Amino acid sequence: MTTLMPEDIIFDENQDDAEYLGKGMRITIGAFVVIPLIAVAFAIPVAWGGWLSWLDLALAVGLWALTAGGITVGYHRYFTHRSFKANRAVKITLAFFGSLAIQGSLDQWVADHRKHHKFSDEIGDPHSPWRFGTSRKAIAKGLLYSHVGWLFESDNTGIEKYAPDIARDKDLTWMSKHFYIFVISSLLLPAVLGGLITWSWMGALTAFFWAGLIRIAFVHHVTWSINSICHVFGTRPFQSRDLSSNVAWLAIPSMGESWHNMHHVDPSSARHGVLKGQVDISASLIKGMEKTGLVTDVRWPKPERLAKKLKNPEDRFRLRGYQPE
């Protein structure tokens, strides 16, 4: 397959590995995209009105760390790319927190992402921003599509084809089929905690708003930015077959996922930020779990191998752990 570049290329909508996504599910997806976004629009006046407390911020940050980490360390680096090995308790814990991010069931998330890597920025990629061509109008349309539009496609990536290992795992299959439990829990947990800690209905309401809706919207849009922004803007220090790029200002909000160019060069690597100065919170979490014995067989990047893929040979001295011969 050739990399998508000509302006007249339109992606083929008919994929023989797709599963039909019903109207009801698309409406549900729409609700979980739009409602948190509406909450964001009201965030400033709500905060200005005094309905924002340190407890709300603490709950929002805490749940952000747990759910975003569940996506980056769990859904992405572990379940999709098998960057390390984990026991059953750790596996279930990562799936639990990833599911609380409300980005879809684990099996479907993994299938979509693996298909993305197989056809990255080519015909068949579920969410390439280059889908409609390379003109300014096409790229603008592609950015919107890759950020959120692709979620409403009627064709779903086939789980049996792209995530058979997830489908065979009884624990993960149960959690995927009962995804609605995690959706309800993710929405109610902030309200319950806020209400119990403050012992007031107002405490429950503001916690629901900030640590529920706002937190969900933030995690959603940061993750979706990797699909959109990190395939159009940024730098590309490594030679890759697609247009994946590094976006430094997204590094902390995405917990290291925005070092996307390197990730597409070495997808199974547990660390994406391999150059000195590149913050990768997810890699630090995995390193901590490795030291405590929670995970094993971690696939850390090999600097000598990566040095050969750098566009500028002088950048090899910026690689973590690189030793000149």
Image: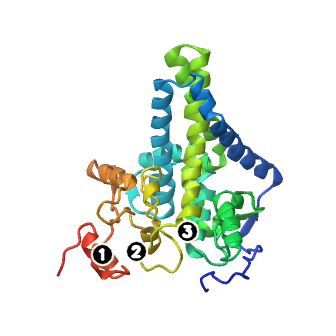
Residue 229 image position (x, y, % from top left) = 56, 62
Residue 32 in the image, given as x and y percentages of width and height: 69, 44
Look at the numbered disc 3 and give the secondary structure of its residue.
Answer: helix
Question: Which percent across, then down, holds residue 286?
Answer: 35, 53
Type of residue at label 2? Pro
Q: CA distance from mark 3 to mark 2?
A: 13 Å
Name the residue rendered at 55%, 39% in the picture: 215
Q: Determine whether the residue tagged by mark 2 lies in a helix, strand or loop.
A: loop
Instruction: Specify the amino acid type for callout 1.
Output: Asp
Does residue 135 lie above or below 189 as drawn? below
Q: Are marks 1 and 2 in contact (CB under 8 Å)?
A: yes
Q: CA distance from mark 1 to mark 2?
A: 8 Å
The reply to whether discs 3 and 1 touch (Cβ–Cβ < 8 Å) is no
Question: Which mark identifies residue 35?
Answer: none
Circle 1 residue: 315
Residue 267 in view in this figure: no
Q: Is residue 74 left or right of residue 28?
A: left
In this view, 264 is above or below 213 = below
Q: Quadrant of residue 207?
A: top right
Residue that extends furthest to the top in the rendered view of this protein:
199
Examine the rendering and report whether any part of residue 36 can be seen: yes
Pointer 2 residue: 237
- Image vertical order of residue 49 relative to residue 306, above or below: above
Q: Which residue is mark 3?
A: 231
**Percent x, y of residue 209:** 61, 30
Relative to 238, is 110 above or below? Answer: above
Q: CA distance from mark 3 to mark 1?
A: 21 Å
Quadrant of the snapshot with the C terminus: bottom left
Residue ranking furthest to the right: 23
